[in-house]
Amino acid sequence: MAATTQDQPDSSMMDLATPAASVSAFCRAVLNQLIPRSFFGLGDAGMSNWKTLMKAVDKFINLRRRETLSLHEVCQGVKVTIAAPSCKVRSLT
Protein backbone atom coordinates (compact mmCIF):
# COMPACT_ATOMS: atom_id res chain seq x y z
CA MET A 1 0.00 0.00 0.00
CA ALA A 2 1.36 3.41 -0.93
CA ALA A 3 1.98 5.93 1.83
CA THR A 4 -0.10 9.08 1.79
CA THR A 5 1.06 12.53 2.85
CA GLN A 6 -0.78 12.05 6.15
CA ASP A 7 1.32 8.98 6.95
CA GLN A 8 4.60 10.84 6.43
CA PRO A 9 5.42 13.00 9.45
CA ASP A 10 8.21 14.92 7.67
CA SER A 11 6.05 16.22 4.81
CA SER A 12 5.20 19.90 4.93
CA MET A 13 2.31 22.02 3.75
CA MET A 14 4.64 23.51 1.14
CA ASP A 15 4.57 20.18 -0.68
CA LEU A 16 0.87 20.80 -1.30
CA ALA A 17 1.22 24.44 -2.40
CA THR A 18 0.47 25.58 -5.93
CA PRO A 19 3.19 27.74 -7.49
CA ALA A 20 2.36 31.46 -7.76
CA ALA A 21 3.01 31.35 -11.51
CA SER A 22 0.26 28.74 -11.95
CA VAL A 23 -2.22 30.74 -9.87
CA SER A 24 -1.39 33.90 -11.81
CA ALA A 25 -1.79 32.11 -15.15
CA PHE A 26 -5.20 30.83 -14.06
CA CYS A 27 -6.34 34.31 -12.96
CA ARG A 28 -5.13 35.86 -16.22
CA ALA A 29 -6.96 33.18 -18.23
CA VAL A 30 -10.19 33.83 -16.32
CA LEU A 31 -9.91 37.60 -16.85
CA ASN A 32 -9.19 37.00 -20.53
CA GLN A 33 -12.50 35.13 -20.82
CA LEU A 34 -14.56 37.55 -18.70
CA ILE A 35 -13.41 40.96 -19.96
CA PRO A 36 -13.49 41.77 -23.69
CA ARG A 37 -10.26 43.24 -25.05
CA SER A 38 -12.14 46.27 -26.40
CA PHE A 39 -12.86 47.26 -22.77
CA PHE A 40 -9.22 48.33 -22.44
CA GLY A 41 -9.20 50.43 -25.60
CA LEU A 42 -8.24 49.95 -29.19
CA GLY A 43 -4.85 49.64 -30.82
CA ASP A 44 -1.58 50.04 -28.99
CA ALA A 45 -3.17 51.84 -26.02
CA GLY A 46 -5.59 48.96 -25.45
CA MET A 47 -2.81 46.38 -25.61
CA SER A 48 -0.72 48.46 -23.22
CA ASN A 49 -3.65 48.72 -20.78
CA TRP A 50 -4.19 44.95 -20.97
CA LYS A 51 -0.51 44.30 -20.21
CA THR A 52 -0.66 46.77 -17.32
CA LEU A 53 -3.58 44.85 -15.81
CA MET A 54 -1.83 41.51 -16.28
CA LYS A 55 1.27 42.84 -14.51
CA ALA A 56 -0.95 44.02 -11.65
CA VAL A 57 -2.47 40.52 -11.40
CA ASP A 58 1.02 39.02 -11.21
CA LYS A 59 2.03 41.55 -8.57
CA PHE A 60 -1.12 40.87 -6.53
CA ILE A 61 -0.63 37.11 -6.61
CA ASN A 62 3.00 37.47 -5.51
CA LEU A 63 2.22 39.74 -2.55
CA ARG A 64 3.32 38.49 0.82
CA ARG A 65 1.38 38.57 4.03
CA ARG A 66 0.47 42.10 5.13
CA GLU A 67 1.54 43.63 1.79
CA THR A 68 -1.06 45.65 -0.06
CA LEU A 69 -1.78 46.72 -3.61
CA SER A 70 -3.78 49.89 -4.02
CA LEU A 71 -6.07 50.78 -6.89
CA HIS A 72 -3.74 53.71 -7.56
CA GLU A 73 -0.83 51.30 -8.10
CA VAL A 74 -2.94 49.14 -10.42
CA CYS A 75 -3.96 52.16 -12.53
CA GLN A 76 -0.43 53.50 -12.92
CA GLY A 77 0.44 53.25 -16.60
CA VAL A 78 -3.14 52.98 -17.88
CA LYS A 79 -3.63 55.15 -20.94
CA VAL A 80 -6.96 56.94 -21.25
CA THR A 81 -8.10 58.62 -24.45
CA ILE A 82 -11.41 60.24 -25.23
CA ALA A 83 -13.05 61.16 -28.50
CA ALA A 84 -13.96 64.83 -28.78
CA PRO A 85 -17.21 65.78 -30.58
CA SER A 86 -15.17 66.66 -33.65
CA CYS A 87 -13.92 63.03 -33.68
CA LYS A 88 -10.35 64.06 -32.89
CA VAL A 89 -8.72 61.75 -30.37
CA ARG A 90 -7.23 63.54 -27.41
CA SER A 91 -5.12 61.95 -24.71
CA LEU A 92 -5.66 62.71 -21.04
CA THR A 93 -2.21 61.47 -20.01
Image (spheres, rainbow, N blue to C red):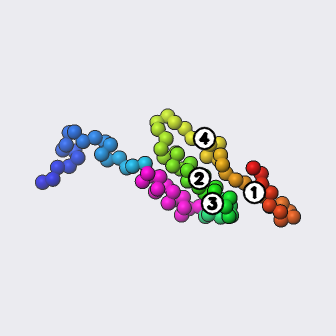
Which label sits in the foreground, 2 or 4? 2
Q: Alpha-carbon distance for marks 4 and 1?
A: 23 Å
Identify which amino acid the numbered label 1 is placed on.
Thr
Label 4 vs 1, first from the N-terminus: 4
Q: Residues within 10 Å of mark 1 (few under 14, many from 20)?
A: some
Residue at (55, 53) in percent of width and height: 54
For the residues labelled 3 and 1, the Cα–Cα distance comes to 13 Å
Observer-side mark, 2 or 3, equals: 3
Residue at disc 3, secondary structure? helix
Residue on which the image places disc 2? 53
Q: From the image, give the main secondary structure of the stretch colored magenta.
A: helix
- Residue where numbered disc 1 is placed: 81
The reply to whether the magenta stretch includes residue 32 is yes
Residue type at the position of mark 2 = Leu
Instruction: In the displayed orientation, state which residue is furthest to the front.
Output: 44
Q: Residue at x 86, y 63 (%)?
A: 85
- Reading the image, the residue beneath label 4 is 70
The residue tagged 3 is: 47
The answer for how far apart the CA atoms under marks 2 and 1 are is 17 Å
Tell me, yes or no, whether the two marked residues, 2 and 3, touch with CB atoms within 8 Å: no
Looking at the rendered structure, the secondary structure element under dot 2 is: helix
Mark 4 residue crowding within 10 angstroms, few (<14) / some (14–19) / many (20+): few
Tell me the amino acid under the disc marked 4. Answer: Ser
Dot 4 falls on a residue whose secondary structure is loop
What span is colored magenta in the figure? 21-35
Near-viewer residue (69 or 44): 44
Q: Earlier in the sequence, mark 2 or mark 1?
A: 2
Mark nearer the viewer, 3 or 4: 3
Q: Are marks 4 and 1 in contact (CB under 8 Å)?
A: no
Q: Please state which amino acid type lies under the numbered disc 3.
A: Met
